[in-house]
């Protein structure tokens, strides 16, 4: 499936079930040509934009996709309640297990290259800037167990703490892209990190008429898996375009214009050699 057909299928799916609004006549101001790409510079606000590439002009473009959001940490388990034995001796409940750490979001892809407008006319380039994924919320901690209430001459154990809840996965980063004269380049967003799993609760301290012992600590939650780094479309990239290792946190499209060479209309007169 071509990149254009993929865009079309996504657009159709996104419109399904939505309400279409029919717009009136286009105002003269909205019909004006987009600004020159030479004046764009860096676009880092998520959304769609357009600019114009002049005939013979070469533009250098860097496209950065959105990073995935970090997964939320898992909630810690609750501590076990205190148990009591003879002589009001307390036996502590086990500690709740720690929640697992959330996974790190994948890094949005970065693609760079140049394009020269050899069409003989000004061409409009469409730019789409993606967004970083939102970090996932952390899980809730578990509820601590209750202490045993001493009731001489009977002794007893505290209750167990409950487990926490799992952290939520981070959101996926959105792709950034450019489209100009049949050339479509996409820098994919990284996927969100997976939320950490919850820690289990500690068991209550054990108290009996003959003695007692401390409760057992809860089990730690497993760390969430890291997100997957963004890819690119098309694959492979056209000649002159390459994937870069880039650490910037803001997705965007960064454009540098290389103006067309100046061509003199006057013929060159040979130097006099007489």
Image: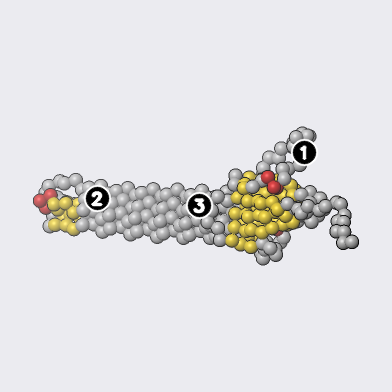
**Residue 244 appears in the rendering:** yes
The quadrant of the image that shows the C terminus is bottom right
Dot 2 crowding, Cα within 10 Å, few <14, some 14–19, many 20+: many
Work out which residue is located at the far front of the displayed protein and give it.
274
The residue that mark 1 highlights is 31
**Residue 197 appears in the rendering:** no
Q: Which residue is nearer to you in this view: 77 or 162? A: 77
Q: Horizontal placement of 78 versus 177: left or right? A: left
Q: Which residue is nearer to you in this view: 95 or 247? A: 247
151 in relation to 245, above or below: above
The quadrant of the image that shows the N terminus is bottom right
The residue that mark 3 highlights is 69
Q: Which residue is nearer to you in this view: 41 or 210? A: 41
Q: Position of residue 107 (x, y in %)?
A: 53, 57
**Which residue is painted at 81% across and 50% down in the image?**
121
Dot 3 crowding, Cα within 10 Å, few <14, some 14–19, many 20+: many
129 in relation to 222, above or below: above
Q: Horizontal placement of 124 versus 215: left or right? A: right
Of badges 1 and 2, the one in the foreground is 1
Work out which residue is located at the far left of the displayed protein and give it.
87
8 in relation to 244, above or below: above
**Which of the two labelled residues, at mark 1 and mark 2, occupies the earlier sequence position?**
1
Q: Position of residue 255 (x, y in %)?
A: 65, 51
Q: CA distance from mark 2 to mark 3?
A: 37 Å
Q: CA distance from mark 3 to mark 1?
A: 38 Å
Residue 124, disc = none
């Amino acid at each position: 499936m071509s990149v254009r057909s993929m865009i079309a299928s996504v657009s159709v799916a996104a419109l399904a079930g939505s309400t279409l609004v029919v717009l009136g006549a286009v105002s003269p101001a909205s019909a004006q040509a987009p600004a020159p790409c030479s004046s764009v510079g860096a676009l880092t606000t998520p959304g769609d934009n357009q600019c114009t590439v002049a005939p013979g002009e070469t533009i250098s473009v860097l496209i950065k996709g959105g990073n995935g959001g970090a997964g939320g940490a898992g909630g810690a388990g609750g501590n076990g309640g205190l148990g009591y034995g003879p002589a009001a001796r307390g036996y502590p409940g086990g500690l709740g297990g720690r929640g697992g750490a959330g996974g790190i979001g994948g890094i949005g892809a970065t693609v760079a290259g140049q394009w020269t407008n050899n069409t003989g006319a000004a061409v409009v380039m469409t730019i789409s800037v993606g967004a970083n994924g939102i970090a996932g919320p952390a899980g809730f901690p578990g509820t601590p167990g209750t202490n045993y209430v001493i009731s001489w001459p009977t002794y007893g154990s505290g209750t167990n703490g409950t487990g926490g809840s799992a952290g939520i996965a981070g959101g996926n980063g959105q792709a950034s892209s450019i489209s100009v004269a049949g050339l479509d380049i996409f820098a994919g967003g990284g996927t969100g990190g997976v939320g950490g799993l919850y820690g289990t609760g500690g068991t209550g301290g054990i108290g009996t008429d003959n003695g007692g012992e401390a409760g057992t600590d809860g089990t730690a939650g497993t760390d969430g898996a890291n997100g997957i780094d963004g890819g690119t479309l098309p694959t492979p990239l056209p000649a002159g375009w390459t994937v870069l290792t880039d650490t910037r946190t803001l997705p965007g499209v960064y454009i540098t214009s290389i103006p067309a060479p100046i061509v003199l209309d006057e013929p060159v007169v040979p130097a006099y050699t007489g």
